[in-house]
Amino acid sequence: MKKLFLLYKRCRTSGSLFLVVVFRLILNYLLYGKRLLLHQHVIIRGTRNIEVPGKLEVGIRYVGFVHRREKTYLNIRGRLKIADEYYIGRGCRFDIGENGVVTIGRGGYLNCHTKVIIMHRLTIGDQCAISWDCQFLDEDFHDIRYQGKEDADHSITIGNNVWIGCGARIYKGTVIPDGCVVASDSVVKGVFRAENALIGGNPAKVIREDISWV
């Protein structure tokens, strides 16, 4: 009863319809064996393709600039693998292609209005904080051809304990090591080697090393 009461309070604060959230929780558990707490304007296609042993919350936390009528759309044609409980903010858009795999570690969250467009692979480590209006994109969808062009690795890898600031854009072939911070509005593409670094700019580069964040 205590958990239900706390959920009710959270729903009231965030503009989520408590009875709808509970109904969808029960329905998804009965149909798919998954504990999904979903705002009433969350649409998921491919629920069977989500692997999450814990609770997945989508859009039911209060964020002051997000309207209660905003829609969240998760189109999971490939696989979404989450290690434990996780939160996805309202207004997010996911498009995971048939051959795409998104893997998310323990802890952390993905905030409002973020786009995850993955046709190949995205790996996010443990305890990563992803701010609002970010984008992860691992495919060009058009091919630019020229002599001597080499095939690039499309995968995006985010280490553990990484903070990605609002408006950051993360593109194919990017590797961000453990403990790094990506500054707001950065455009990130490429392999970074230094852990605990501040990465920022367009194109992004290492601005400072030996940092920490809380």
Image (cartoon, grey):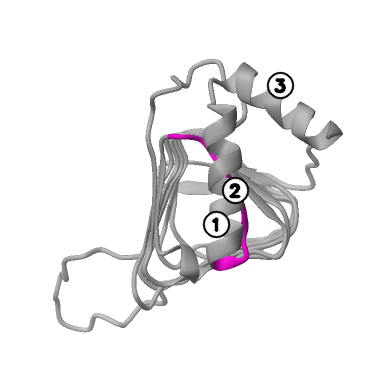
* Residue shown at the point (71%, 21%) measured from the top left: 9
Relative to residue 53, is residue 168 depicted above or below?
above
SS of the residue under disc 3: helix
User: Residue 25: which numbered mark, if any?
Assistant: 2
User: Is residue 33 part of the magenta span, yes or no?
Assistant: yes
User: Magenta region: which residues?
Assistant: 32-40
Query: Identity of the amino acid at label 3?
Result: Lys
Give amino acid for label 1.
Answer: Asn
> What kind of element bears circle 2?
helix
Q: Are marks 1 and 2 in contact (CB under 8 Å)?
A: yes
Instruction: First in sequence, mark 1 or 3: give its number.
Output: 3
Structural crowding at the residue carrying mark 2, measured as other residues with C-alpha within 10 Å and reported as few (<14), some (14–19) or many (≥20):
some
Residue 15 spot, x, y in % from top left: 53, 20
Where is mark 3, residue-wise?
9
Q: Earlier in the sequence, mark 3 or mark 2?
A: 3
Would residue 198 be seen by someone viewing this image from the given angle? no
